[in-house]
Amino acid sequence: QQPVQSPQAVILREGEDAVINCSSSKALYSVHWYRQKHGEAPVFLMILLKGGEQKGHEKISASFNEKKQQSSLYLTASQLSYSGTYFCGTADRGSTLGRLYFGRGTQLTVWP
Amino acid sequence: DAGVIQSPRHEVTEMGQEVTLRCKPISGHNSLFWYRQTMMRGLELLIYFNNNVPIDDSGMPEDRFSAKMPNASFSTLKIQPSEPRDSAVYFCASSLPSLAGGPTGELFFGEGSRLTVL
């Protein structure tokens, strides 16, 4: 039930773009994205509740393909501050109310 | 406004000792989660409370782990007896229901309690 994230790690130069993918074997109710910097707590980025939904947060956006049970996080013109580990969290349809499964994370490093 | 407050931030103990981790959720949040983070297993949900009632504890590893939420502003996670494999960062998070009335809204995480069991 844990979603699968890819890639495991990404190294970018400032200004480059990246895509992080999250897929589940279960039918999904919602997808959450969080960013965690080293030694800190995960911080919420966005939640997608409906298939086809897209959202943006600064130059970070995400999409949710309900049929494919997938979500993607898009980081555009990356900044140094984007470095960290990105986690997707998924809530399965039919699972216990409130249960959120997190992927293993994608470590993003942005170099100047 | 204060965020989720966890204590202690760091705990080093010896195998067999009892460990108690504490959490104060954000005022007004009615859902509280305990997660464990390790390199090997990532972020694992241990237990989830809604309105102080445990809803899902299927993630609790074994009987050595117990969690309580005696009131809306306090929760504890206890490990007795502790083992080296319990070493991890334990996060507490709280949330309101999602705006759409769905299962989970935005989670606000505490700074975590780093546990080392020798």
Image (cartoon, coloured by chain):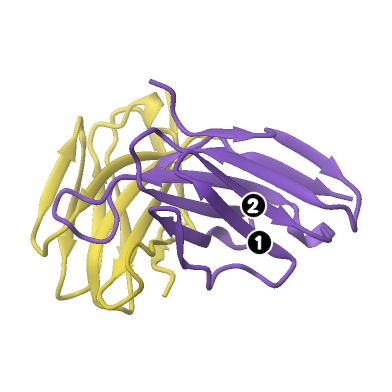
What subunit carries mark 2?
A: B
Please name the residue that numbered disc 2 is placed on.
Answer: B77
Q: Is residue B81 left or right of residue A39?
A: right
The mark total stands at: 2
Q: Identify whether B27 is placed above or below A98.
A: above
Q: Identify whether B59 is placed above or below B84.
A: below
Q: Position of residue B72 (x, y in %)?
A: 44, 43
Residue at 35%, 27% in the rendered image:
A14
Q: Quadrant of residue B114?
A: top right
Q: Is residue A69 left or right of residue B18?
A: left
- Helix, strand or loop at label 2? It is strand
Q: Nearer the viewer, residue B77 or B117?
A: B77
Q: Is residue B100 visible?
A: yes
Q: Position of residue B104 (x, y in %)?
A: 29, 56
Q: Is residue A39 visible?
A: no
Residue at 26%, 58% in the rendered image:
A31
- Helix, strand or loop at label 1? It is strand
Q: Say whether mark 2 and mark 1 are on the same chain.
A: yes
The reply to whether callout 1 and callout 2 are in contact (CB within 8 Å) is: yes
What subunit carries mark 1?
A: B
Q: Position of residue A96 (x, y in %)?
A: 36, 72
Mark 1 surroundings: few (<14), some (14-19) or many (≥20) residues within 10 A: some
Please name the residue that numbered disc 1 is placed on.
Answer: B66
Q: Nearer the viewer, residue A98 or A101?
A: A98
Three-letter amino acid code of the residue under disc 2: Leu
Three-letter amino acid code of the residue under disc 1: Ser
Q: Is residue B31 left or right of residue A66?
A: right
Residue at 53%, 73% in the rendered image:
B58
Q: Which chain is yellow?
A: A
Q: Which chain is purple?
A: B
